Image (cartoon, rainbow, N blue to C red):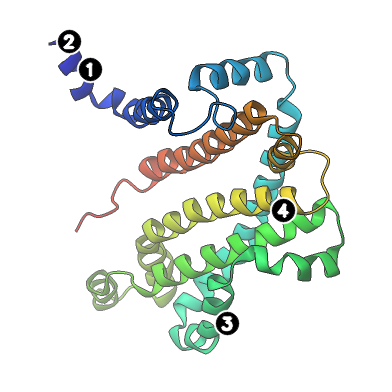
């Protein structure tokens, strides 16, 4: 009965996924589907993870990756959000640049690394620039469509009541666009992290989780490699969770008629 109560308690539901992952991981080792030298047991990997944090060895890389991601994300918001709102409020203007937005949004950002290297060189600015570019397109796209798809009935109701165009835009269209905009923000912060990790792996870097992963792979330190991968996944989940909590707090009307 207690076990059933545990699984039916919504507070514990987020633990089901990690437990299933660890169980599948252990099954692969026990069934000898993968050699332990290539995939160490989960217990040993988690122990190595704890040691990396208690010793502080992994902390500089975590902070470096997090700082680059947040800088890139802040730039993406500063550029993408105003542009998205501007284009969304003038649909004809958005349609005129829609091809460019969709073209670069559909192009893997890793394919643009050589271009950004030519412009910014092998520096931290390069990693932040390419991550902010990829994230900015997602913010722009979602905020523009959020404004364009604002509920027409509420807009028309405000116009019929004689509300000025500015207040219709500010108090109706912008507020209606927030749920879609926050979806874009959550996707953008995840994209920024992914691009930063890739850039750290393939552009000259001395710190960062991406650098740590590729460095551990090259010297065949599989425990450290999997530890860094787990931390990267946890960091991405944590950033997404922060935005989910902010969204629930600020946009409590989302999805309501």
Marks 4 and 2, how far apart in space?
47 Å
At horizontal 72% and vertical 48% (from top left) the residue drawn is 201
Marker disc for residue 100: 3
Mark 1 and mark 3: Cα distance apart in space = 50 Å
The nearer-to-camera label among 2 and 3 is 2
Q: Position of residue 120 (x, y in %)?
A: 84, 63
Camera-side residue of 249 and 20? 20
Q: Sequence order check: which comes first, mark 4 or mark 3?
A: 3
Q: Secondary structure at mark 3?
A: helix
- Residue lying farthest top? 2
Q: Is residue 123 left or right of residue 22?
A: right
Mark 3 neighbour class, 10 Å CA radius: few under 14, some 14 to 19, many 20 or more:
few
**Mark on residue 6?**
1
x, y percentage for residue 83?
57, 72
Placement of the C terminus among the 4 image quadrants:
bottom left
- Residues at marks 4 and 3, CA–CA distance in whole angstroms: 23 Å
Across and down, in percent, residue 9 comes to 22, 22
Per the image, the residue denoted by label 4 is 199
Q: Of tags 1 and 3, which is closer to the observer?
A: 1
Badge 2 is on which residue? 2
**Labels 1 and 2 touching (C-beta < 8 A):** yes
Question: How far apart, in angstroms, are the residues tagged by discs 1 and 2?
Answer: 6 Å
Instruction: Decide: few, some or many residues near mark 4? Use Cα within 10 Å; few <14, some 14-19, many ≥20.
Output: many
**Whether residue 201 is situated above or below residue 213 in the rendered picture:** below
């Amino acid at each position: 009965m207690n076990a059933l109560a545990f699984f039916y308690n919504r507070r514990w539901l987020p633990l089901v996924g990690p437990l299933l992952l660890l169980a599948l991981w252990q099954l692969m080792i026990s069934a000898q589907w993968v050699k332990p030298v290539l995939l160490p047991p989960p217990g040993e990997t988690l122990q190595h993870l704890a040691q990396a944090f208690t010793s502080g060895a992994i902390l500089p890389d975590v902070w470096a990756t997090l700082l680059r991601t947040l800088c890139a994300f802040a730039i993406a918001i500063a550029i993408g959000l105003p542009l998205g709102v501007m284009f969304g409020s003038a649909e004809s203007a958005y349609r005129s640049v829609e091809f460019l937005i969709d073209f670069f949004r559909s192009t893997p950002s890793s394919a643009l690394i050589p271009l950004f290297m030519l412009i910014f060189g092998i520096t931290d600015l390069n990693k932040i620039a390419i991550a902010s570019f990829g994230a900015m397109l997602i913010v722009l796209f979602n905020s523009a469509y959020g404004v364009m798809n604002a509920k027409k009935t509420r807009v028309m109701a405000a116009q019929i009541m004689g509300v000025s165009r500015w207040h219709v835009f500010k108090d109706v269209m912008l507020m209606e666009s927030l749920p879609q905009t926050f979806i874009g923000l959550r996707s953008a912060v995840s994209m920024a992290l992914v691009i930063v990790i890739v850039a750290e792996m393939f552009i000259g870097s001395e710190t960062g989780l991406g650098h740590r992963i590729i460095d551990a792979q090259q010297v065949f330190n599989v425990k450290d490699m999997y530890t860094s991968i787990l931390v990267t996944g946890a960091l991405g989940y944590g950033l997404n969770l922060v935005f989910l909590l902010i969204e629930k707090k600020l946009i409590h009307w989302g999805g309501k008629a």
